[in-house]
Image: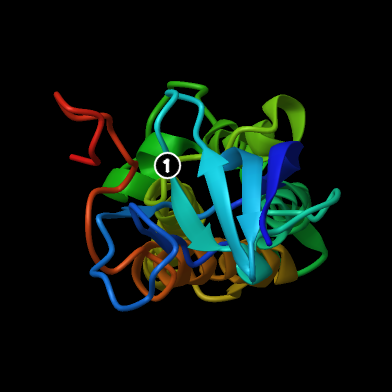
């Protein structure tokens, strides 16, 4: 016997869920819901749950796979990578004897072109861009899937560009451990973004259920 009424709230698990028009596994799913979507459970029936999405559309899903409670749906890895890039930029990026320079001493234009410049726009400013990865913790809204990849690339490109620059500087100039920290942060964010954008992407159907002209999923 099913239970009707406002049963509670839940979220679609990270990998997404197929949605049916009726609680019958013999039928083909009519849509697929993206992971992380908030839903209202309005009915349950022998392991099935009828859920309503924020746009008012409702359908049946495998209720055993719904995420309830305060489970975290945002991976901490992009935020860790962003912090690593910022911290790495404060550490020595290059050393020469007893002297060292951080990302806040290295001109951005010089890293990009390997030419000297009088413009005081330091690499440290570029490494602040990945802090966008902290937005989900402030707004409780996930970033688009490829954003962490783009943000991580900033750190990777900055570190690699500086390593190439060091190769043409006078002998005795060596990479600092801050470059390694920045590179590791960029790699962590990029890899996590690629995993999220590929392996964890819903594999079929519309990304979010939409009501059709007759109330069926589009």
Depth check, front residue: 100 or 212:
212
Q: Quadrant of residue 95?
A: bottom right
Depth check, front residue: 37 or 191:
37
The N terminus sits in image quarter: bottom right
Counting every numbered tag in the picture gives: 1
Q: Which residue is mark 1?
A: 144
Q: Is residue 69 above or below residue 185?
A: above
Q: In the drawing, does residue 135 fall left or right of residue 90? A: left
Q: Quadrant of residue 9?
A: top right
Q: Whole-percent x and y of residue 205?
A: 22, 57
Residue drawn at (14%, 24%), measured in percent from left and top? 213
Q: In the drawing, does residue 35 fall left or right of residue 22? A: right
The C terminus sits in image quarter: top left
Residue drawn at (26%, 70%), measured in percent from left and top? 27
Depth check, front residue: 175 or 204:
204
SS at circle 1: loop
Residue drawn at (37%, 36%), measured in percent from left and top? 109
Q: In the drawing, does residue 62 fall left or right of residue 112? A: right
Residue drawn at (37%, 51%), measured in percent from left and top? 146
Q: Is residue 209 above or below residue 122?
A: below
Q: Whole-percent x and y of residue 68?
A: 78, 54
């Amino acid at each position: 016997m099913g239970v009707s009424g406002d049963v509670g709230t839940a979220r679609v698990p990270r990998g997404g869920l197929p949605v049916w028009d009726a609680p019958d596994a013999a039928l083909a799913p009519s849509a697929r819901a993206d992971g992380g979507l908030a839903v209202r459970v309005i009915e349950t029936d022998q392991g099935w749950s009828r859920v309503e999405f924020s746009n008012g559309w409702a359908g049946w899903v495998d209720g055993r796979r719904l995420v309830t409670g305060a489970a975290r749906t945002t991976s901490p890895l992009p935020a860790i990578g962003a912090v690593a890039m910022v911290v790495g930029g404060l550490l020595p990026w290059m050393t020469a004897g007893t002297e060292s320079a951080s990302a806040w001493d290295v001109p951005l234009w010089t890293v990009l072109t390997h030419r000297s410049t009088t413009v005081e726009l330091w690499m440290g400013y570029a490494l602040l861009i990945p802090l966008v990865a902290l937005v989900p913790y402030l707004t409780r809204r996930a970033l688009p899937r490829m954003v962490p990849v783009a943000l991580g690339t900033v750190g990777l490109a900055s570190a690699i560009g500086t390593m190439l620059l060091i190769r043409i500087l006078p002998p005795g100039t060596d990479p600092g451990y801050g470059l390694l920290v920045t590179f590791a942060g960029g790699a962590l964010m990029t890899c996590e973004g690629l995993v999220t954008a590929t392996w964890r992407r819903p594999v079929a159907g519309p990304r979010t259920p939409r009501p059709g002209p007759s109330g069926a999923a589009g």
